[in-house]
Amino acid sequence: MSTKQTMQPGELQRLEEAGDWLLRLNSATHTEADVEAWLRWCHADDRNLAAYEALQRDWQDLDALKQAPVGKPARRFNVAWALAAGVAAVVLTFSIVQIRSQSPAVVAAAVSNRAATLPDGSKMILGAQSLVNLDFSGATRRLDLSSGEAYFKVKHDRSRPFVVQAGEVSVTAVGTAFDVRRQDDDIVVTVEEGIVEVAGERETWRAAAGYQLRYSNRRRTASIATVNPEVALAWRSGELAYVREPLGSVVEDLNRYSEHKIVIEDPAIAALPFTGTAFAASLEDWLAGIEAAYPVVVRRTDDDEVVLTSR
């Protein structure tokens, strides 16, 4: 009996879907809608994410095997995925390797907060439902934060600038630690160590440790304020802290951690300033607190959404 015959049809379909997502997210033409659809697929079944991550590891191992120097052993990769899925998956696997060999970009995506070591030894913590593309092949270490939030602790290398692109804003740092968060209209950069240079469409600003820069995509301007980095970056441990943040922005953040989408129907509610803390693991408690402290009613819809309306 062949290995393919021992795999259940549902497992084969899951593997093929995981391969499709790996190809789509690694494409330079992927969109935020693709990311949102991938996240819905991951949340639909824990086995979906497990299949995606296993195939992603095999892809990376295949690339290491391909690039190993002659005469030196490469890491062994798990061929069970390709064998179990049959010819179609084998063809898919080699297509992935071919695309990777034509482009230096690597895609990192997270369903929940996740730490990673980058190719240059820098550290990254990728926030929930966030996506970043990396290209470290040239003279500049380039990253593109397509969605969500990411914290970087950069390994010093003055000869190779470390640049994070977030929409029309680029953040450049050498040997520093900082955070970049994408919101609907704003890009928020928080500096924990060192200095970063933030370049918008019209101007360039500098922010040092203990400062937070907020760039408005709509107005093409930036504002800088002092912050406590320990508080502002507490999201790394699942604690989300805010000081006079518009409630709409807070909800946008929380939706990256919530199983149920939170919707604000009234713009006046979205503009309310919020100062406080929310924990990713207990958002129900936060919703109860919001209903008690604000003129807001929390209701749940048949579509499994949480809607905030005026009382």
Image (spheres, grey):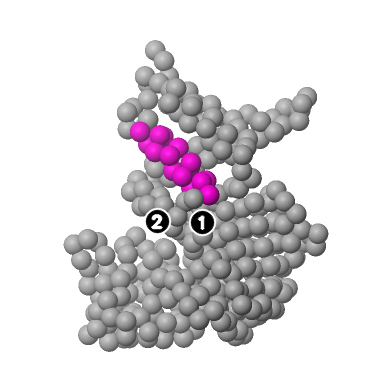
Which quadrant would the C terminus be assigned to in this image?
Answer: bottom left
Please name the amino acid that badge 1 sits on.
Leu
Residue 278 visible, this orientation: no
Provide the residue designation for mark 1: 131
CA–CA distance in space, label 1 to label 2: 12 Å
Which residues are the magenta region? 13-28
Quadrant of the rendered structure where residue 6 is?
A: top left
Residue 77 visible, this orientation: yes
Quadrant of the rendered structure where residue 296 is?
A: bottom left
What kind of element bears circle 2?
helix
Quadrant of the rendered structure where residue 159 is?
A: bottom right
- The numbered dot on residue 33 is 2
Nearest to N terminus: mark 1 or mark 2: 2
What kind of element bears circle 1?
strand
Residue pictured at 53% horizontal, 26% vertical: 79
**Front disc: 1 or 2:** 2
Could you tell me residue 168's position as x and y percent? 56, 68
Please name the amino acid that badge 2 sits on.
Ala
